Image (cartoon, rainbow, N blue to C red):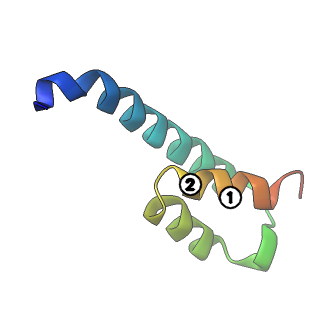
Amino acid sequence: MKLSQMLPFIIPLVLIHYTLAVIALVNLIKKKKVRFNNKFIWGVIIFVFEIIGPVVYFLANGDEE
């Protein structure tokens, strides 16, 4: 399969990945307190684990303020 044939599948995944990462990072920066009290580790999780990282961040930190 050529790259040009795969682009319709790759572009939405890339957009989802970056959108989730930006939203999660903005949320992380705005929060005063996060679970396990370590914003740096959450930032690493968001970036390293691509699409799953932001999802884990939102599930783990839910409504916590």
Find disc 1 in the rendering and name its residue. 57
Quick one: quadrant of the C terminus? Answer: bottom right
Q: Which amino acid type corresponds to the residue marked 1 in the rendered image?
A: Tyr
38 or 46: which is nearer to us?
46
Residue 28: give x, y in percent of width and height: 66, 56
Distance of label 1 from label 2 (alpha carbons): 9 Å
Q: Earlier in the sequence, mark 1 or mark 2?
A: 2
Lateral position of residue 17 relative to residue 40, left or right: left
Q: In this view, does 46 lie above or below 21?
A: below
> In terms of secondary structure, where does tag 1 sit?
helix
Residue 3: give x, y in percent of width and height: 13, 31
- Eye-nearest disc, 1 or 2: 2
Q: Is residue 5 above or below residue 22?
A: above
37 or 50: which is nearer to us?
50
Please name the residue shown 59% across and 42% down the image: 23
Q: In which quarter of the image is residue 59?
A: bottom right
Residue 30: give x, y in percent of width and height: 71, 52
Q: Mark on residue 52?
A: 2
Q: Which amino acid type corresponds to the residue marked 2 in the rendered image?
A: Ile
